[in-house]
């Protein structure tokens, strides 16, 4: 559409991560839950093979139980990490970012290990992967980006279409949506 409207402004164009134009960004965000759950299941297999290193469980089922337990604890009360508190929606956002890319599998295992320790009250200091995420969360650039993204997503379309659940590692109610009601 852009090249048709502004043919003299485009010589070459790269389209990355194109999406279905008939769906809203909100719907696309919400419908990613099944793929993220599958990615988490897929990640749990090698994470279990690395039990000696990460201590998340000896089987994929045990690894998933570790993730569920950590998120369930964060649902009850935010986890204390590095002088701050991380609630379950923030943890799901962090996990979502790591699950989306297989190259982050080791970082995901390290982060889950640290967050599980925090859920048990045993984390004295976060490792480098969780520290990097915490630094990112506390910097102004992502905050500005997230606000802009949330405004775009929440304002996209006339309504909020029904979609699959967002990433949930527990059998509780769905996580809060990113948009106010």
Image (cartoon, rainbow, N blue to C red):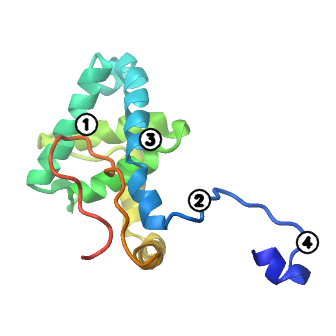
Q: Are marks 4 and 1 in contact (CB under 8 Å)?
A: no
Mark pair 1, 2: CA separation: 31 Å
User: Is residue 48 visible in this depiction of the protein?
Assistant: yes
Mark 1 or mark 3, whichever is nearer to me: 3
**Quadrant that contains the C terminus:** bottom left
Precedes in sequence: disc 4 or disc 2: 4
Mark number displayed over residue 11: 4
Q: Is residue 111 left or right of residue 169?
A: right
Residue name at image x 44 percent, y 72 percent:
153
Q: Which residue is the site of mark 2? A: 20
Query: At which x and y percent is residue 161?
Result: 37, 65
- Residue 115 shown left or right of residue 151 in the figure: left
State the residue in front, 121 or 87. 87
CB within 8 Å, label 1 to label 2: no
- Where residue 99 sits, quadrant-wise, is top left
Q: Going 38% across and 20% down the picture, which residue do you hit?
A: 50
Q: Secondary structure at mark 1?
A: helix
Name the quadrant of the N terminus. Answer: bottom right
| Mark 2: few/some/many CA within 10 Å (<14, 14-19, 20+) | few
- Report, in whole angstroms, how far the alpha carbon at label 1 lies from the one at label 3: 17 Å
Instruction: Identify the residue at image location x=21%, y=61%.
Output: 83
Front label number (1 vs 2): 2
- Coordinates of residue 175 in the picture (x, y in percent): 23, 56
């Amino acid at each position: 559409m852009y090249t048709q409207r502004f043919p003299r402004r485009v010589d070459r164009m790269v389209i990355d991560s194109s999406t279905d134009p008939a769906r809203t960004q909100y719907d696309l965000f919400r419908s990613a839950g099944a793929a993220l759950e599958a990615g988490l299941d897929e990640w749990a297999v090698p994470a279990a093979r690395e039990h000696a290193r990460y201590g998340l469980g000896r089987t994929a089922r045990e690894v998933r139980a570790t993730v569920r337990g950590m998120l369930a604890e964060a649902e009850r009360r935010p986890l204390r990490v590095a002088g701050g508190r991380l609630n379950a929606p923030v943890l799901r956002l962090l996990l979502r970012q790591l699950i989306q890319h297989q190259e982050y599998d080791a970082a995901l295992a390290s982060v889950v290990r640290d967050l599980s320790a925090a859920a048990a009250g045993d984390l004295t200091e976060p490792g480098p992967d969780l520290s990097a995420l915490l630094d990112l969360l506390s910097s102004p650039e992502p905050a500005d980006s997230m606000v802009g993204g949330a405004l775009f997503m929440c304002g996209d379309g006339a309504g909020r279409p029904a979609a699959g659940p967002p990433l949930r590692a527990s059998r509780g109610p769905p996580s809060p949506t990113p948009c106010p009601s």
